[in-house]
Image (cartoon, grey):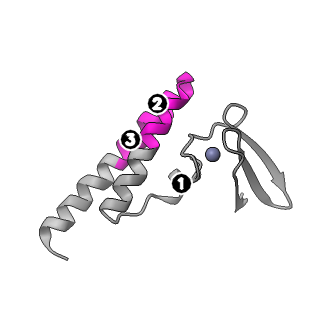
Amino acid sequence: MNQRKKYAQRIARERIKILFSLAQERALEGDEELARRYVEHMVNLSKKYNVRIPRDMKRMYCKKCHTFLLPGKTAQVRLKKGKVVIKCLRCGAYKRYVYRK
Ligand SMILES: [Zn+2]
């Protein structure tokens, strides 16, 4: 990988982090649409520069419609046999992951 690409990826990673916190802020303020746009932007950056979005960030948005998932607001969270089941209340998509203490 050349230096230039590495540099671009580093910038992309930084921007992803920033976009994530912006999305979180907007979602907490109740502006779901704007939060969704930040998440979309984040996902596009990760594809364009081929950088991975950290797993704990990935858990916080719907991969189908990019809604920022807030339990009780935009998401329904259930615990089922040691698994966390999250339902996106906007598009109805589910995501599951293993619950760890
Ligand atoms: Zn969704």
The amino acid pointed to by label 3 is Leu
Magenta span includes 34: yes
Of the image marks 1 and 2, the number of the one nearer the N terminus: 2
Q: Amino acid at mark 1?
A: Lys
Q: Most extreme residue toward the top, as rendered?
A: 29
**At 31% across and 47% down in the image, what residue appears?**
15
**Residue 54 image offset from top left, x and y in percent:** 47, 58
Ligand 1 resides in the quarter of the picture at top right
Query: Do residues under tags 1 and 2 come within 8 Å of each other at their CB atoms?
Result: no
Of the pair 51 and 33, the residue shown nearer to us: 33
Q: Which residue is mark 2?
A: 34
Residue on which disc 3 sits: 19
Quadrant for the N terminus, please.
bottom left
Q: Magenta residues, as a range? A: 16-39
Queried on whether the Cβ of the residue with tag 1 lies below 8 angstroms from ligand 1, the answer reads no
Q: Position of residue 91 (x, y in %)?
A: 67, 44
* Secondary structure mostly seen in the magenta stretch: helix
State the CA–CA distance, disc 1 to disc 2. Answer: 18 Å
Callout 2 crowding tier (Cα within 10 Å): few <14, some 14–19, many ≥20: some
| Residue assigned mark 1 | 58
Q: 72 left or right of 44? A: right
